Image (cartoon, helix red, strand yellow):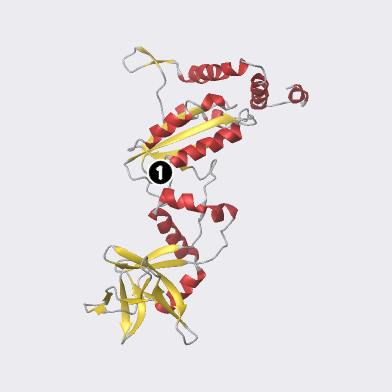
Amino acid sequence: MDALVASGNPSFGSLLAAALTAAWTVPGLGLLIPEINGWVIGGNLVHSMIDSSGAVVQGRRGPDYMIGTGTKSDGEQNAYRVDSIEVIFDAMTADYLDFLDEILPVAPLFPQAGYISLRPSLRGSATLSMHNVMGIWAISIEIASPKNLPGNAAWMSFVHKCAVRHNGRPHWGQYNKLDALTVSVLYGDLLNQWRAALHRVSGASVRFSNAYTLQRGLEPVGIVRTVTAVRKSGRKITDLCHAGEAWSPVPVSQAIQEIQAGTMKYFAMGGMSSALITVVSDGHGGHALRTVADSTSRIIWIVCRYVSGKGNRHWRDGSARH
């Protein structure tokens, strides 16, 4: 604290962090911090207002930005800086309530002091929006604590893990430690759609790749395509197809290159089952496509039997012991 004062012009936020940190070193004094924090935040939210009928009422009503941030000058102040995490849930499920039930009881055990706010909104439609949930409503939960408090790092990490465990999606621009597998679990087919859209724009270019996108699997690779039909020229398969998909048809030669590069993953669909299509040697110095072995060690070849129909020819499962 003395060093901050001696520095000349310390921010109020830095003085606050130093005072709180000092309080936690005094046995018992740290227990008062949650109460003081509640008084301060509550005091800013509870005011008398005059409603439309002229009656005096308690509380605050107004535009979201005025309640959450305040005036423009309030939002641009430099006195306070915080560490924050925002996680978004489908508000039509109980996931966000389970999340709060897990973090609220233990929050005072961490040397941090801030707030937890809930903000409902309509679901989003952007492909990889955190708010693109199944229900019609999303709920954003923001948790913040003044910078430089000793428990912030552990608190943010704990909240992040709890949120993911309850299907919460961390905000892309705040505390976010997701990896590729977790992103895939949280976003499902939305991630595949986003990767496909990115591939249409940039191809396999890594111009916009960085450590952040690589860690989270936000790259135009591993895009899943399901194949439901093929085209033939004579007895030779020339194209992989899926009616209605923008990528269809794909020449077999192109599919081989994409699979080898890791850009695409093709799956052959037959009824309720599917099989990953891989690239193998054709025995003559070239390459061919076939599906991987299933649980009974069979190989289901793409060059199988065909059902005649209009346009494309659809395959039936034809198997050979491997």
Residue 107 higher or lower than 89, as above or below: above
The answer to whether residue 180 is visible is yes
**Which residue does the image show at 45% across and 31% down from the upper left?**
102
Name the residue at 31% across, 64% down. Answer: 273
Picture quarter containing residue 149?
top right
Q: Where is 220 relative to 126, above or below? A: below
The number of discs equals 1
**Which percent across, then down, holds residue 43?**
50, 17
**What kind of element bears circle 1?**
loop
Q: Residue furthest left?
A: 309
The residue that appears at 55% across and 28% down in the rendered structure is 74
Quadrant where the N terminus is found in the figure: top right
Write down the residue under mark 1: 131
The quadrant in which residue 318 appears is bottom left
Q: What percent of the width, then of the height, locates residue 250?
A: 38, 74
* Quarter of the figure that contains the C terminus: bottom left
49 with respect to 213 (left or right): left
User: Is residue 301 rendered to the left or right of residue 23?
Assistant: left
Depth check: give the residue in front, 73 or 280. 280
79 in relation to 231, above or below = above
Residues 303 and 55: in front is 303
Q: Residue at x 30, y 69 (%)?
A: 228
Dot 1, crowdedness within 10 Å: few (<14), some or many (≥20)? many
Q: Is residue 82 visible?
A: no
Residue type indicated by callout 1? His
Spot occupied by residue 54 in the image (x, y as percentages of width and height):
34, 13
Give x and y (percent) for residue 150. Answer: 64, 30
